[in-house]
Image (cartoon, helix red, strand yellow):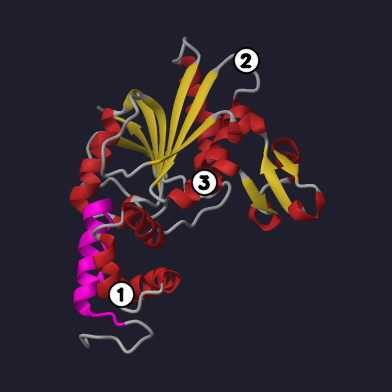
C-alpha cells in the first residue's frame, strides 16, 4: 500500500491510522482497512467545505475544534433506516411483547428506548405500533427516548418531516392516520409525522460510549444495526449496560445480522433477533 494516495487531497496511511484511533476512542466504532476509501470520501467533503488541502492539517484542526469533532463524527457514522424495517420486530411487539407488558404493568407506564434512532423512522414506527396496540387500553403513560450519535440525523428526526418516497412502504391507512401532507409549493411532496406521535418521543444526541444521563428502567430497547461496528469487548460492555437499564421482564431487539451469542448471557433469545432479559 502506497504511503500517500494520488487523490485530490494528500492522505497517508498515517492519517488513516490517526482517524481510526480517534473514531475508536470517541465512538467505539472499529474501522477496518477496507474502510479507507469510505473514510477518504466522507471526510474529503469536510476538507472542501473548510478550504483545507491536506488531511494532516485537518487532523491538527480536530485537536482544537470541538464543533468540527462533531462534524467529523457525523461524517463517519452510517444512517441507513426505513419505516417498519425488519417488520417481524413490530409484529412481535404488537401481538406479543406489548400484550405481555400490559398485563404486568399495573401502573400503566411503559418506557422505550430507540438507541441509534438515525433519522427517526424507527422511533416513529415504534410509536405507531404502540398506539395501535394500546388503542383499547386508555390512559397509558408511554414515553420513547430516541438517541443517536449523529447530531444532524437527530435534528432531522425531531422535525419529523419526510419525502413521499420515504413512506412508500407504509400502507395508506397508516399514512392517513399518522402523517399530515405538506401544503404549498415549499412543502409539496412532504409529509409530517402527526403531533400525537411526536409528543411521545424525546430525541437526544448520545454517545453510547459515554455516560448515560437517563435513569431507566426501560421495558423495551431497540439497538439495531449498531453493534456491528463495535469489537466484541465493546459489545459485551454495551449489552451489560443495557441489561442494567432494563426492567426484569424487558425486551431487546437487535439487527438482522447481530447476535448476543458468546457476547452476553443476560438475555435469552426468544425469536428472530428478539431477546428477553434473563438476569
Magenta-span inclusion, residue 23: yes
Task: Report the residue marked by disc 3.
Answer: 155
Relative horizontal placement of residue 131, taking residue 251 as reference (left or right) = right
Q: Is residue 246 visible in this depiction of the protein?
A: yes
Residue numbers of the magenta segment:
10-34
**Residue 70, quarter of picture:** bottom left
> Residue under circle 1?
36
Residue at point 42% right, 31% down?
220
In percent of width and height, residue 118 lies at 47, 49
Q: Circle 2 sits in a helix, a strand or a loop, which is it?
A: loop
- Give residue 23's position: percent from left, percent from top: 26, 59
Q: Position of residue 102 (x, y in %)?
A: 50, 18
Q: Earlier in the sequence, mark 1 or mark 2?
A: 1
Few, some or many residues within 10 Å of mark 2 (<14, 14–19, 20+)? few
Query: Which residue is labeled 2 in the image?
Result: 138
Mark-to-mark CA distance, 1 and 2: 52 Å
For the N terminus, give its image quadrant: bottom left
Taking depth in this image into account, of 218 and 204 the one nearest to the observer is 204
182 left or right of 59 in image: right
Residue under the point 52% across and 39% down: 123
The magenta stretch spans residue 164 = no
- Give the Cα distance between marks 1 and 3: 28 Å
Mark 2 against mark 3, which lies toward the viewer? 3
Amino acid at each position: 500500500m502506497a504511503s500517500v494516495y494520488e487523490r485530490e487531497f494528500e492522505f497517508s496511511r498515517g492519517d488513516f491510522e490517526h482517524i481510526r484511533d480517534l473514531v475508536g476512542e470517541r465512538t467505539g466504532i472499529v474501522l477496518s482497512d477496507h474502510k479507507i476509501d469510505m473514510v477518504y470520501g466522507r471526510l474529503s467533503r469536510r476538507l472542501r467545505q473548510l478550504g483545507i488541502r491536506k488531511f494532516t492539517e485537518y487532523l491538527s484542526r480536530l485537536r482544537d475544534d470541538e464543533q468540527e469533532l462533531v462534524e467529523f463524527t457525523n461524517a463517519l457514522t452510517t444512517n441507513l433506516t426505513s419505516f417498519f424495517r425488519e417488520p417481524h420486530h413490530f409484529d412481535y411487539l404488537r401481538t406479543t411483547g406489548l400484550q405481555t407488558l400490559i398485563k404486568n404493568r399495573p401502573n400503566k407506564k411503559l418506557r422505550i428506548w430507540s438507541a441509534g434512532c438515525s433519522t427517526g423512522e424507527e422511533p416513529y414506527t415504534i410509536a405507531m405500533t404502540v398506539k395501535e396496540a394500546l388503542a383499547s387500553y386508555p390512559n397509558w403513560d408511554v414515553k420513547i427516548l430516541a438517541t443517536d450519535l449523529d447530531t444532524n440525523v437527530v435534528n432531522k428526526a425531531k422535525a419529523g418531516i419526510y419525502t413521499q418516497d420515504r413512506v412508500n412502504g407504509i400502507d395508506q391507512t397508516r399514512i392517513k392516520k399518522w402523517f399530515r401532507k405538506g401544503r404549498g409549493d415549499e412543502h409539496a411532496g412532504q409529509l409530517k409525522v402527526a403531533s400525537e406521535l411526536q409528543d411521545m418521543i424525546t430525541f437526544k444526541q448520545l454517545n453510547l460510549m459515554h455516560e448515560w444521563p437517563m435513569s431507566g428502567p426501560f421495558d423495551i430497547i431497540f439497538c439495531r444495526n449498531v453493534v456491528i461496528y463495535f469489537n466484541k469487548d465493546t459489545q459485551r460492555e454495551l449489552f451489560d449496560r443495557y441489561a442494567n437499564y432494563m426492567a426484569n421482564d424487558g425486551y431487546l431487539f437487535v439487527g438482522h445480522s447481530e447476535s448476543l451469542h458468546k457476547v452476553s448471557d443476560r438475555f435469552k433469545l426468544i425469536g428472530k433477533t428478539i431477546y428477553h432479559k434473563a438476569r
